[in-house]
Amino acid sequence: MSFFPVLLATITPFDWQRLWLSADMPASFLLEIAFRCVVMFLLTVAALRISGKRGVRQLSLFEFALILVLGSAAGDATIYHDTPLLHAVVVFVVIIALYVLFNYLTDKFPRVERMLEGEPELIILEGEIDLSAFTKASLTGQELCGQLRQLQVEHLGQVRRLYIEATGEISVFFFEPQHERPGLPIWPELYKHPLHELPTAGPHACHACATVRELPAGPVPAQCPRCGQAAGWLPACATPRIA
C-alpha cells in the first residue's frame, strides 16, 4: 500500500525537463545520441546491403526475425548511454553471419529451406478452395477475396490455381476466357451474405469451399457434398474476367 505514495513522491507529473531530457543526463548527451543514430543507420544500411536484394523484398519468416533482432540492437545502441556501440556491432556481425550461413544451407539442402522459410501452399484449384490448406495458411475468406479483387477477379470460377507463397504473397493463374466456369462471387456485398434459403433454382457456390452445384429453389442442403460444411450458398457468377 505504501508503493503509490513513494512513487508520487519521487516522480513529478508533467516534469518538462524529465519528459524532454533525462534527469541523469546532460543536454550535451543529445549530441552523442545523434552520433549513435548516424553510426547505427550506416551499420543497418550496410547489413541490408550485405544481405542482398532478398532482404528488402517481401520478407520471409527468417528475414523478418533478422530485421527484428537488428532493429532491437540498433535501437538500444542509439539511445541507451550504457550500451556500447561495439556490442551492437557484434550483434550485427553475428546476425549477418547467420543469415549468410542459413542462405547457404537453404541453397544446399531443400529440407532446411522448407523448415526455415516454409513452402508454397496450393489454396485454390480449378475454382475450388482446399479448406485444409486454407486453414493452415491462417487466412480469412475476407482477406483472400480482398487480394483477389485487387487482381480484378469477380468470382473464383476465373481462377485456375492460387498459391500462398512462403513470403505470404499470393500467386494466381487464371483460366483462359473460353475455359472460365461459374464460381463463387467475391464482391463484398454478395460474399458477406450467404443464403440458406434459395429463391430460385440454378448453379450455386458453397460459401466455404466454392464448389458449384445445381440446386433447386428452397432450403439449401444441410451440408456441402464436397466439404461437409453448412456455411450457406451463393448464386454462382459466370461473368468473364476483364483485366
Image (cartoon, rainbow, N blue to C red):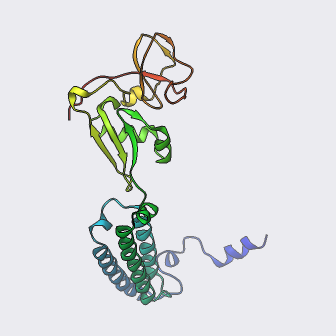
Q: Quadrant of the C terminus?
A: top left
Question: Is 25 placed above or below 55 here?
Answer: below
Towards the viewer: 231 or 189: 231
- Residue 219 position in % (x across, y down): 53, 13
Residue under the image location 39 percent in, 31 percent down: 188
**Residue 107: where, in percent of width, then height?**
34, 68
At a point 50% along the width and 74% down the height, the residue shown is 19
In the depicted structure, whether residue 107 falls above or below residue 36: above
Q: Which of the 4 image quarters holds residue 234? A: top left
Q: How many marks?
A: 0
Q: Is residue 181 above or below residue 76?
A: above
| Residue 215 x %, y % | 45, 14
The quadrant holding residue 44 is bottom left
- 242 sits left or right of 132 in the view: left
**Residue 46 location (% of width, % of height):** 30, 79
Q: Nearer the viewer, residue 155 or 221?
A: 221
Residue at point 29%, 77% (across, down): 50
On screen, residue 44 versus residue 14, left or right, reads left
Please state which of residues 143 and 118 is positioned toward the viewer in this rendering: 118
Location of the N terminus by quadrant is bottom right
Residue at 42%, 10% (x, y): give it.
Answer: 201
